Amino acid sequence: MNNAPFPFDLKTINAKKKQLAWGDVPPIYQLTSNALSELESILTHGFESAYRQILDRNSWNLSLLKASQNEKGDIVVKHKPKIALQHVYTKHDYELHCFPVMNGEKLAVSLHKHPRCPFIHWVPETMQMLFRINAIVSFIIFSYKKGDEADLALIRFAHNKTMELIDILTESFEVVDVIGYNIAQFCQEIGHRSQVEK
């Protein structure tokens, strides 16, 4: 899988799956598709998320970042906040985690109004996990065993959407490290392990 734009949207992929499955779409597909639908709206719908919260410049330590306002009234920073990202896979799900970087170290503890932290308040319990794609690990394994072209398209869509959201972060943040396999690399590893087991 590459990061090239994928020509199908989620609605088109779901329609193709319904056609290929003769209307009997497996629950594992539906779970992953629903999670991707929620992910797709992370920036456009009003619900609060950790992803949106860290992008809110009002939550940043503006004095540390040497911030000012431009003529439009937008907050502009001289130094981008430093963060590290981590692709995390649980038994069933994928999560993207974020860690502020302070003095070259990833923070995994709560900090409030610390002068060297890039955020005014950093609370890992509510801010570290930026988003989750439910059931995608199980779905990827299912797809390698019994998948069709719509299943593979959904996995590719998931990869491209997560990479797009990471790209948005790189516009506002200095991402000093990205740890772990992205979804495409995870799929390659699953494929490699499947070949070794044969």
Image: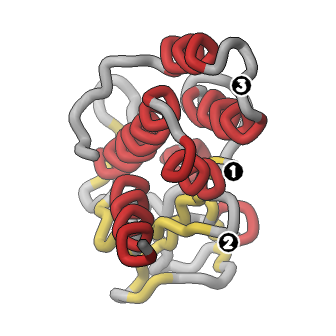
> Which of the two discs, 1 and 3, sits closer to the camera?
3
Quick one: label 3, few (<14), some, or many (20+) residues within 10 Å?
some
What distance separates the C-alpha of mark 2 from that of mark 1?
23 Å
Q: What residue is pinned by disc 1?
A: 135
Q: Position of residue 102 (x, y in %)?
A: 42, 82
> Which of the two discs, 2 and 1, sits closer to the camera?
1
Q: What residue is pinned by disc 2?
A: 124
Q: Secondary structure at mark 2?
A: helix
Q: Position of residue 119 (x, y in %)?
A: 53, 65
Q: Secondary structure at mark 3?
A: loop
Q: Position of residue 99 (x, y in %)?
A: 50, 72
Give the side of residue 23 with respect to residue 44, left or right: right
What distance separates the C-alpha of mark 1 from that of mark 3?
15 Å
Q: What residue is pinned by disc 3?
A: 25
Q: Amino acid at mark 1?
A: Ala
What distance separates the C-alpha of mark 2 from that of mark 3?
37 Å
